[in-house]
Amino acid sequence: MIKTQIQKLIAIVAVSFLVASMASAQGKQDFTLHNNTGVEIHKLFISPHDVNEWEEDILGKDTLADGETLEINFSRKETAKLWDLKIVDKEGTSIEWENLNLLEISEVTLHFKDGKATAEVK
């Protein structure tokens, strides 16, 4: 009976380590992006705020339709706190949001209404 309890304890500890290592593989900046802009997003760029150029388009050949949601995951090695986000629609019109503290934000909802771009964060 004691041997069975020890085996169960070892299994629980092993599973705990596995779950912890999987969680740490994700970046602390991971967030959910909601597109409520009224337009389909054709390009999406996210770069650290202190960098003067945009990283690669993370959508690639895909698009993000109005009303759709996208999970954005970072490498766990990423350390930047503040990030800028840029979207581009089919016509090439772009909108930017700056200084998003992705260490404190888990969701970003993008809005565009009456010519004004806003972002709601949680």
Image: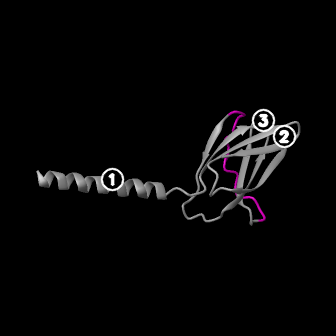
Looking at the picture, does residue 12 appear above or below residue 37?
A: below
Q: Contact, CB < 8 Å: mark 1 with mark 2?
A: no
Viewer-closest of 29 and 121: 121
Q: Which is closer to the viewer, label 1 or label 2?
A: 1
**Magenta part mainly helix, strand or loop?**
loop
Task: Report the span colored magenta.
Answer: 52-67
Residue 73 sits above or below residue 67 on the image: below
Q: Position of residue 71 (x, y in %)?
A: 60, 45
What residue would you read off at disc 3? 39
Identify the residue under disc 1. Answer: 15
| Badge number at residue 91 | 2
Q: Nearer the viewer, residue 104 or 45?
A: 104
Type of amino acid at the residue the image marks with label 1:
Val
Mark 1 vs 3, N-terminal side: 1
Q: Position of residue 78 (x, y in %)?
A: 59, 63
Element carrying mark 2: loop
Residue 114 disc label: none
Q: Measuring 44% from the left and 54% from the top, which residue is drawn there? A: 22
